[in-house]
Amino acid sequence: MRRRVLVLNGPNLGELGRREPEIYGPATHEELVAACVEEGLTLDLDVEVRQTDDESTYLGWLHGVDGSDVDALILNPAAWTHTSVAIRDAAAALSVPYVEVHLSNPLSREEFRHVSYTAGKAVGIVAGFGLDSYRLALRGLAQRGG
């Protein structure tokens, strides 16, 4: 039975390919989904990718993870990374490991992006490699068995 990884993407990531491609690259969210699913197959992982601009929906997804149907998570809270204590608290309560992922490197950008509320409980952080950030996170989770 394949291990299951849930990828949760936050606000504005549905606009990939159109929104600031010089920062986030030319790939669309649909291409991001395909890359994650494809990489998962090579690693013997079932990967599901979700995206929302609604913080309540994102929190509901986090609260719904109990470890019985998901083995690990990849979180890209996007702007909520730097602003949402609620997302931080929900991530801290997860019973499964997660990796925080960013397409760009937040530390090379505006100062307000230098603080991540969610990184402290992550088993790892991958940032700055575009779509490869997700591939690298999946590889890391596959190698650690989660």
Image (tube, rainbow, N blue to C red):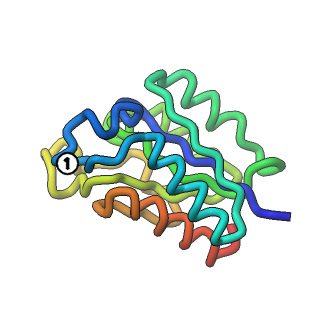
Q: Quarter of the image for the C terminus: give it.
A: bottom right
Please say if 84 is above or below 142: above
Instruction: Report crowding for label 1: few under 14, some 14 to 19, many 20 or more residues within 10 A (C-alpha).
Output: few
Q: Can you name the residue that lies furthest to the bottom here? A: 143
Q: Can you name the residue that lies furthest to the right here? A: 1
Q: Is residue 63 left or right of residue 109?
A: right
Identify which amino acid the numbered label 1 is placed on. Answer: Ile
Q: Is residue 23 left or right of residue 72?
A: left
Q: Is residue 109 left or right of residue 121?
A: left
What residue is at 23 percent from the left and 45 percent from the top?
113
What residue is at 57 percent from the left and 64 percent from the top?
39
Q: Position of residue 65 (x, y in %)?
A: 71, 42
Q: Position of residue 142 (x, y in %)?
A: 64, 72
Please say if 20 is above or below 138: above
Q: Quarter of the image for the N terminus: give it.
A: bottom right
Numbered-mark total = 1
Q: Classify residue 29 by image quadrant.
A: top left
What residue is at 52 percent from the left and 47 percent from the top?
33
Residue located beneath label 1 in the image = 23
Where disc 1 sits, the SS reads helix
Front residue of 40 and 99? 40
Q: Position of residue 35 (x, y in %)?
A: 50, 56
What residue is at 38 percent from the left and 41 percent from the top?
28
Q: Position of residue 78 (x, y in %)?
A: 37, 40
